[in-house]
Amino acid sequence: MIWFWMILFGITSHSQSKKWTLEECVNYALENNISIKNTALDKELADIERSAAIGSFLPSANATTSHSWNIGLNQNITTGLLENQTTQFTSAGVNVGVDIYNGLQNQYRLRRASLSQIATQYQLTKMQEDIALNVANAFLQILFNKENLKVQKEQLLNNQGQMKRSEELLEAGVIPRGDLLDSKATVASSEQLAINAENLLLISKLSLAQLLQLEDFKDFDIIDREYEAVQSPLLLQTPESIYQQAKETRTELKIAQTNLEIAEKDVSISRGAYQPRLQGFYSFSTRASNLDRVTGIELNPSNPTSVIGVVEGTNQNVLQPNFNAILGRPSPIFEQFDNNKGQNFGVQLTVPIFNGFATRNNVQRSKVALERTKIAYEQEELTLERNVFQAFTDVKGALKSYEAAVTTLEARQEAYNYAKERFEVGLMNSFDFNQSQTLLVNAQSEVLRTKYDYIFRTKILEFYFGIPIIQKP
């Protein structure tokens, strides 16, 4: 029993201490994100539409059957005579039809359905790319908040040490009491900054956990990894070359191109309604009847092999070719089905002449939709070009900001060291020293901010160039 609880505790501790890598976060999001699942359902619908388009080439076959009761004066469907009697009729048949030619509409519908499959696959890929980019951004935001929290905690320890040092200098009579009060205020301010940094880190973790749609995200955490802010090789290329590469790889442009081809097929489908339609058909039918009542029987003088049946309630003599029917004993059902079977087959040509401009209006609507799609494609090209140039400029600007922040940090660090030396010997008051310390902390935070901003913007530029967020080994 003790071993069981030890193993269970070990498993629980391991599950709680699991830290996620960027690759694990991206892969988990791709498998569990609701938007991706919803887009995958659109792809299934496109598969069904293509199956329906293939089915339009196949013949249609329908089987029918009916059973009825005729009471009073009705036409006998077997003999074709009007009879005043109670009769049961059973009929069955099979109808088969096939489109031989319908203006190539079935062919265009199949091509359109195939393009729709491609479009939905592109849309699924686009959704996956967007989710991966959002996950990477949230992942880097956690890393930034972690390092920023370290800076704030280190600064808090330094301020606490300086406050203790100020107490010693005050007792030695080196500094006035006001400097100690300034040191205590600085410590309180540092504690507040550290608490804010902890809250930002918690919020960023919750944001990524919710993006991954984890049910239990209380202990969610990621692996601490150091990312180097090195110059991207893409900066050695021109924005024009990156844009040309993006035109070949970017999914949103492929979606726009596929939608354009779908619109062209819609025009062809609507135009096909102008052409004649040729259909082939075949039908097979059979029937049987059951005469419920007759009142009298006599021989037919003109044909001794048949009889005359007198129907109850009338004075009508009806020629009955079947002795069993006259005697109230109908022929066997299957024998009647075999005797009364018939077939019908042929072709039907339908030539459209005038339908209230319906076909013409459908063609015009599809042409308008095609023009809209062309404009959307051109707009997508312009948007992609603008985004590539913007991403290239952002990466260059972010790199310069990071380099400038590093230079500023080095200067602030030297200024802080110099101020610390002067403060310890009493040549600088606590207010000026705290100002130097604040500038140092701000410089450290700015280096972190510009570093991760540059890394993320580099990911975006690589994204447009066709480099995936997660590099496969």
Image (tube, rainbow, N blue to C red):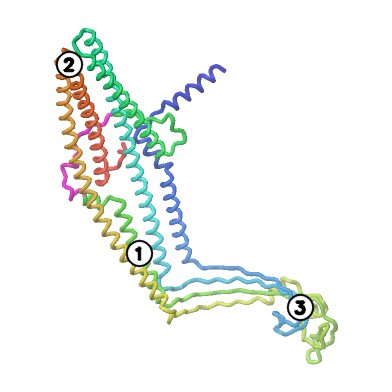
Closer to us: 382 or 195: 195
Amino acid type indicated by mark 3: Ile
Look at the numbered disc 1 and give the secondary structure of its residue: helix
Q: Which residue is mark 3?
A: 71
Closer to us: 261 or 25: 25
Mark earlier in primary sequence (2, 1):
1
Q: Which residues are magenta?
A: 226-242
Q: Is residue 19 left or right of residue 189?
A: right
Q: Residue furthest bottom?
A: 302
Asked if the magenta segment contains residue 234, the reply would be: yes
Q: Which residue is mark 2?
A: 423
- Quarter of the figure with residue 184: top left
Counting other residues with Cα less than 10 Å from the Cα at mark 1, is it few (<14), some (14-19), or many (20 or more)?
Answer: many
Counting other residues with Cα less than 10 Å from the Cα at mark 2, is it few (<14), some (14-19), or many (20 or more)?
Answer: many
Closer to us: 266 or 162: 162
| Percent x, y of residue 383 | 25, 54
Q: Which residue is mark 1?
A: 263
Q: CA distance from mark 2 to mark 1?
A: 76 Å
Look at the numbered disc 2 and give the secondary structure of its residue: helix
Amino acid type indicated by mark 1: Ala
Mark earlier in primary sequence (2, 3):
3
Instruction: Tell me whether the residue at label 3 lies in contact with that at label 1, contact meaning CB atoms closer than 8 angstroms.
Output: no
Image quarter hosting the N terminus: top right
